[in-house]
Image (cartoon, rainbow, N blue to C red):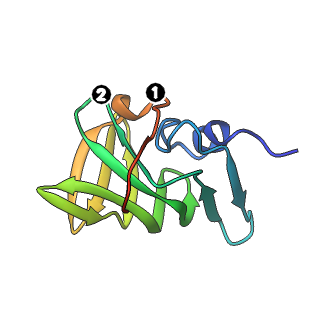
Amino acid sequence: MQKPLPDLLQEYDMPIGLFPKDATNYEFNEETRKLTVFIPSACEVGYKDSSVLRFFTTVTGYLEKGKLTNVEGMKTKVLIWVKVTCITTEGSKLHVTAGIKKTRSRDAYEVLGDGISIDRF
């Protein structure tokens, strides 16, 4: 039996609300550390710090303690939508790399948020 996605994220020192609330199906290969998260439809999630992440129906990356690297299927708004390539945690901070590294409050990502469906990723 697979543990819930928020529990897996917490185990790897990542904020539990990183993915939309309805992203409940995932595959995680413990040997390669590859994480694949399945999301019912492309969506975006707004966080408490006014940041927004956009998700494709499948998001992949490599999960290690405190970081998710080689991310595919996730974007953030930095004037325009930019592909997120890496997310790392450091204490109360969350670093989102999307061309440039943007530091955000980790607290904003500790709440499960609803995804709002979008037409195009």
Say whether disc 2 or disc 1 marks the residue closer to the N-terminus: 2
Rendering coords of residue 12 (x, y %): 59, 47
Task: Identify the element where label 1 is drawn.
Answer: loop
Q: Place residue 82 in its image quadrant.
A: bottom left
Locate the N terminus by quadrant.
Answer: top right
Single out the residue that lies furthest toward the right: 1
Q: Decide which of 14, 85 is in the foreground and name it.
A: 85
Q: Decide which of 63, 24 is in the foreground and name it.
A: 24
Q: Are marks 2 and 1 in contact (CB under 8 Å)?
A: yes
Q: Is 114 displayed left or right of 47 in the figure?
A: right
Rendering coords of residue 21 (x, y %): 55, 36
* Residue drawn at the location 73% of the way across and 65% of the way down: 29
* Residue drawn at the location 21% of the way across and 53% of the way down: 77
Rendering coords of residue 75 (x, y %): 33, 60
Mark 1 crowdedness (10 Å alpha carbons): few <14, some 14-19, many ≥20: some
Locate the C terminus by quadrant.
Answer: bottom left
Q: Is 24 displayed left or right of 60 in the figure?
A: right
Q: Is 35 displayed left or right of 44 in the figure?
A: right
Q: Which mark is residue 48?
A: 2
Q: Residue 10 carries which label?
A: none
Rendering coords of residue 23 (x, y %): 60, 45
* Residue drawn at the location 28% of the way across and 55% of the way down: 76
Q: Decide which of 81, 35 is in the foreground and name it.
A: 81
Task: Identify the element where label 2 is drawn.
Answer: loop
Q: Distance between the residues labelled 2 and 1?
A: 9 Å
Q: Which residue type does callout 2 highlight?
A: Lys
Q: Which residue type does callout 1 highlight?
A: Val
According to the image, label 1 marks what residue?
111
Single out the residue that lies furthest toward the left: 79
Mark 2 crowdedness (10 Å alpha carbons): few <14, some 14-19, many ≥20: few
Q: Decide which of 121, 108 is in the foreground and name it.
A: 121
